[in-house]
Amino acid sequence: MKEPIRVEGLRKVFKSAGNEIRAVDGIDLAVETGEFFGLLGPNGAGKSTTIGMLTTRVIPTEGKAFVAGIDVVADPATAKRHIGVVPQTNTLDRQLTVTENLEFHGRYFGMSKRDAAERSKELLTLFRLADRADARINELSGGMAQRLMVARALVHRPEILFLDEPTSGIDPQTRLALWEILRGLHAEGQTILLTTHYMEEADALCERLAIIDHGKVLALGSPAELKDRLGADTVITLTFAEPPESLLPKIEKLGAVDRVESADSTVRVYAAETEGLLADIVTLATKANVRVTDASSQPPTLEAVFLALTGRDLRE
């Protein structure tokens, strides 16, 4: 199976009060076997709608979507047997124990009682939930419940695992623990598609990702490739007491500066060489009577890539 996920001209238009909302607007993507692929973008970018169409929960307005070579619209029942899905909301059965949530899921997918029980024990160990095997769902912390949802999605050994904002709302320690588990799954050859608005998550986990906004793919590549497109080794971010329009042409003329972008009182300077550059900018600001209230310098990030593409912050 060369391309376990493939979409062609995928569109989804929602109609509300006579208006049309293009949640997904002509996406083309292909994910390779064993790849950890990410959709990165702000809330409302179209990530969850895309994953909804791929997992048969949302019917496309136009285009084609295939998982494991199966058209998800033409044959959704067969497509579901090849995928595991972790949605944003907690869908665990609160009337069942942790173990029962796993075993019943396996039985639903046609596993024998014995196989479902053995697979459940294996996953409880992998996801560090063995000591909570007989607990009720309302006894679990948010992080435990999230790990259980990922474990449940894997019971029937799906070819493709879909994760829709899997670490949203959980604490940093739990997030790192889940990252470790996901890296292990990927190392064993699991194909994974992740949606996230956390740039550090996409950078840490994904081999390749698509930056998406307003339902369109703005850029596609590995995290390193996307950051290289900025053409800068460093991004200096400065915040001024007031919009520094008069200062921008002077900063652009500094020798090491590649380009300058501004939004209100925040200025980002992309540069290949930075030795002494921040001091030079502060000196220019002082001479122009423009006060610098904050300044930082860091290597290019996916946040900077998104900003360069859209002119707005990734978290907006």
Image (tube, grey):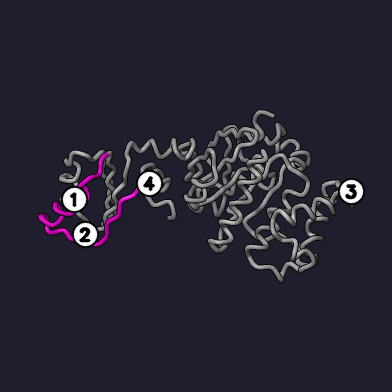
Determine which of the numbered discs, if any, sits on residue 304 in the image.
Answer: 4
Determine which of the numbered discs, if any, sits on residue 112 in the image.
Answer: 3
**Which element carries disc 4, helix, strand or loop?**
helix
25 on left or right of 189: left
**Which element carries disc 3, helix, strand or loop?**
loop
What residue do we see at 71% from left, 71% from top?
139
- Mark 1 residue crowding within 10 angstroms, few (<14) / some (14–19) / many (20+): many
Q: CA distance from mark 4 to mark 3?
A: 50 Å
Magenta stretch: residue 281 in it?
yes
Position in image of residue 83 (x %, y %): 72, 43
- Mark 4 residue crowding within 10 angstroms, few (<14) / some (14–19) / many (20+): many
Q: CA distance from mark 4 to mark 2?
A: 20 Å
Nearer-N-terminus badge (4/2): 2
Nearer-N-terminus badge (4/1): 1
Residue furthest right as drawn: 113
Nearer-N-terminus badge (4/3): 3
Q: Are marks 2 and 3 in contact (CB under 8 Å)?
A: no
Magenta stretch: residue 120 in it?
no
Q: Name the quadrant containing residue 60.
A: top right
**Which element carries disc 1, helix, strand or loop?**
helix
Position in image of residue 80 (x %, y %): 75, 43
What residue do we see at 27% from left, 41% from top?
271
- Pointer 2 residue: 292
Q: Are marks 2 and 1 in contact (CB under 8 Å)?
A: yes
What residue do we see at 12% from left, 59% from top?
289
- Pointer 1 residue: 281
Q: Which residues are magenta?
A: 273-299
Nearer-N-terminus badge (2/1): 1
Quarter of the image that includes the N terminus: top right
Q: CA distance from mark 2 to mark 3?
A: 67 Å
